[in-house]
Image (cartoon, helix red, strand yellow):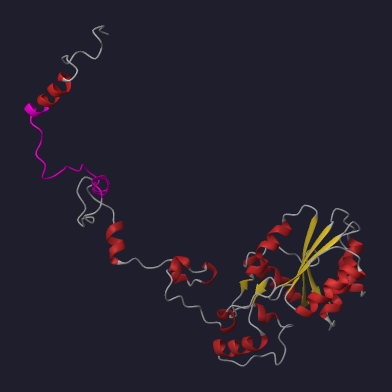
């Protein structure tokens, strides 16, 4: 293990409280971004300039900046949230991006912006040693170092998008480190609009059902239609019926509420005094008595 790795793993001292380690890869495991080929084409299309870094991609901080688009990987959202809630656990991100100054600041900002949480370099965010070629070998050495930093560690759970790494980690954790754990292969494909840089189109979906992370500013606040503006305009006289009547199948009570005033039944003659007296008489005739004081004659 290099001097750099030893310093990284021991500078915070031993932590006996950690029993479970949760390790997440970053690229295509926590966040989606453009692949090397598609990203270079996207850069040239959006900027009108040739990619200025030759064949380099993963070691270039510009790959994690605009004009590229980014998104969270849905497959690991719930797992990351659950891991953070484990009082016995420690959540770390290990990425093959190299430990240069710009990545140390760019990566935490991007993870925070996408809602993954707060990650601090050399605390819960670890970048590959400068000059290290083999990411898999570096991650294995880091895992062994974690067993020394966390003396009570008994379980390591990992998430990674590369199938070869997944099988290697499974064998290394159980056979070499003699620990329990599970390694999950993240297989969620990168969304098309991340690869192309072109916003997704939803011709048959209303704006409120679109993913909010992908909405453009004008979609977040759609313009009012004339009908909406008319129905939502303030009313000067609350007792005055609405200018635009409701459909005929709406109940009288709904019409009353919508109009803001009293609703009067139409085409129905009011009951005369004689008809009311006749109803009272027919009601009392069946009981054989006359209307009387409801107080029962006792007064108040």
The quarter of the image holding the N terminus is bottom right
Residue 175 pos. (x, y %): 91, 70
Of residues 125 and 106, which is closer to you in this image? Answer: 125
Horizontal side, residue 26 vs residue 226: left or right: right
Percent of width and height locating residue 25:
75, 72
Location of the C terminus by quadrant is top left
User: Which residue is at the front of the view, 96 or 211?
Assistant: 211
> Front-most of 105 and 264?
264
17 in the magenta segment: no
Q: Quick check: can you spot residue 196?
A: yes
Picture mark count = 0
The residue under the point 79% across, 80% down is 164
Q: Is residue 86 above or below residue 33?
A: above
Q: Residue at x 19, y 13 (%)?
A: 292
Furthest-top residue in view?
A: 298
Q: Quadrant of residue 43?
A: bottom right
Tell me the residue at 6%/27% (across/down): 274
Magenta-colored span: 251-276
In the depicted structure, whether residue 218 falls above or below residue 84: below
Quarter location, residue 19: bottom right
Is residue 247 found left or right of 190 in the rendered image?
A: left
The percent coordinates of residue 179 (x first, y second) are 88, 63
Q: Is residue 50 left or right of residue 298?
A: right
Residue 269 on the magenta span? yes
Q: Is residue 20 above or below residue 200?
A: above
Q: Is residue 52 left or right of residue 134?
A: left
Residue 7 visible: no
Q: What is the x, y in percent for residue 4?
A: 89, 73
């Amino acid at each position: 293990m290099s001097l750099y790795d030893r310093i990284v793993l021991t500078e915070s001292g031993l932590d006996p409280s950690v029993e479970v380690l949760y390790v997440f890869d970053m690229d295509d495991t926590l966040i989606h971004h453009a692949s090397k080929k598609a990203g270079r084409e996207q850069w040239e299309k959006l900027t009108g300039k040739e990619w200025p870094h030759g064949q380099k991609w993963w070691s270039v901080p510009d790959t994690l900046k605009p004009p590229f688009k980014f998104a969270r990987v849905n497959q690991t959202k719930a797992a990351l949230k659950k891991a953070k809630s484990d009082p016995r656990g420690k959540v770390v991100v290990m990425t093959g991006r190299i430990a240069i100054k710009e990545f140390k600041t760019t990566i935490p900002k991007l993870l925070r912006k996408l809602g993954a949480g707060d990650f601090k370099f050399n605390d819960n965010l670890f970048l590959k040693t400068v000059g290290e070629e083999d990411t898999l070998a570096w991650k294995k050495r880091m895992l062994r170092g974690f067993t020394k930093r966390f003396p009570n560690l008994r379980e390591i759970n990992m998430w990674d998008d590369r199938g070869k790494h997944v099988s290697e980690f499974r064998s290394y954790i159980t056979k070499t480190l003699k620990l329990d754990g599970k390694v999950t292969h993240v297989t969620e494909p990168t969304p098309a609009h991340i690869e192309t840089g072109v916003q997704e189109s939803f011709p048959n979906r209303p704006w409120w059902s679109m993913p909010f992370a992908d909405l453009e500013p004008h979609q977040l606040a759609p313009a009012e239609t004339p009908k909406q503006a008319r129905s939502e305009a303030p009313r000067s006289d609350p007792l005055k019926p609405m200018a635009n009547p409701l459909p005929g199948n709406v109940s009288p009570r709904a019409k009353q509420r919508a109009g803001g005033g009293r609703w009067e039944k139409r085409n129905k003659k009011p009951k005369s005094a004689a008809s009311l007296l006749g109803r009272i008489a027919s009601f009392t005739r069946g009981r054989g008595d006359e209307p009387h004081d409801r107080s029962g004659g006792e007064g108040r």
